[in-house]
Amino acid sequence: MTAMPKSGGRFQAVLGTGWLLLGLAAWLYARAKNVAGPAAFAVGAAFLAEFPCYISAGFDAVRHRLASLGKIRLAALMLASALAPYLISSVAAGSFDARALLLLAAIAGVAAFWYVLLPVCAWTDAALLILLAATLLSGVFDRIYISPLPKLSISILGHLMLIRTAAWAILGIRGAGENGGGIAAVEARFNFWPDAQQWLTGLRYFAALLPAAGVALWSLGLARLRPHPLNAGLALATFFGILWVVALSEEFFFRGLLQPWIAAWTGSSRAGLLVTSLLFGGAHLGFQHRFPNWRFAIVAAIAGYFYGLASQRGRGVQASMVTHALTVTLWRVFFQ
């Protein structure tokens, strides 16, 4: 067995810290809601099992080591790890459903084996992104992950699973690709922490977005202020939750993959930026379960344009993650 590079120590440190914080959060939630027993344990254990799988794609040392397994074995490992959190949460809580497991296996299997079974080309790249978007927007994970705890949705486990499975398929199996021959290169990195320059770029485009977003929100009648804004602690937790889940996943796929791919297919970086922004807006047509929510889709498309600029100027999606996370946090803190 090959030794893990020194940077693998960072993965172990993040894993240990994350497990500690997740365990503490689960304990505090259980005390606040007065829940206990196998159901609470099952939910907590499922999130602890998903955590290392989700963060693994963000560490070069882990990716390099697992990529050495070969495409088929790596895809099989991705599929097995996709099913583990569901089995933990459902079997221990007594909510296991064989049909749900088969559906989950089909979804994860398609993502994991996509580039094992299909060639790397423009149509397979586009089809994969369409399938991923359709799966996330369909709400299928709400039907698969049935929470044993009242008023607690655990479908986020499905979202996390699909995000990291697709990231592994693209980064570990598809590979970087080429510029030429109809195969667009993968320039995105699935990293959790922006560097100093990316923080500054993200902040700059967030400031540039505010006037345009503000005018759009007020003119479309979407600016409804909260009577009581979220406190500083909740705002900070919201920011990092958005940064590491929502912003990371959406920026990786939209600005990291789709935008440069469209630019390569059309031969125009401007077309890549504009088309991706429109598609990003379209992905928000179901916002707040008000399909078609055209007004919010317009605002999302405007925001997507600035996210795209941040990604272009900030040398990667980590800059647009900052812009994205600040925008969503501002919305959740002050608006309803």
Image (cartoon, grey):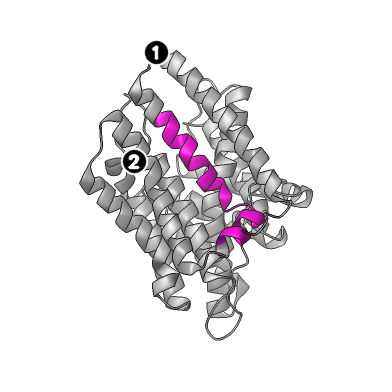
- Disc number placed over residue 87 in the picture, else none: 2
Magenta region includes residue 56: yes
Task: Identify which residue, 96 or 271, lies in the foreground.
Answer: 96
Task: Identify which residue, 312 or 161, lies in the foreground.
Answer: 161
Q: Is residue 252 above or below residue 230?
A: below
Name the residue at 38% across, 30% down: 42
Q: Is residue 311 above or below residue 45?
A: below
Q: Is residue 246 visible?
A: no
The reply to whether discs 2 and 1 touch (Cβ–Cβ < 8 Å) is no
Furthest residue in direction front, as rendered: 1
| Quarter occupied by residue 190 | bottom right
Q: Estimate the x, y position of residue 100 in percent, counting from the top left.
A: 25, 46
- Disc number placed over residue 34 in the picture, else none: 1
| Quarter occupied by residue 118 | bottom left
Side of 32 where 192 appears, left or right: right
User: Depth-wise, is mark 2 or mark 1 nearer the camera?
Assistant: 2
Q: Estimate the x, y position of residue 116 in percent, counting from the top left.
A: 43, 71
Q: Estimate the x, y position of residue 37 in percent, counting from the top left.
A: 35, 19
Q: Earlier in the sequence, mark 2 or mark 1?
A: 1
Count of all numbered marks drawn on residues in the image: 2
Side of 19 where 202 appears, left or right: right
Task: Identify which residue, 103 or 321, lies in the foreground.
Answer: 103
Residue type, mark 1 in image: Asn
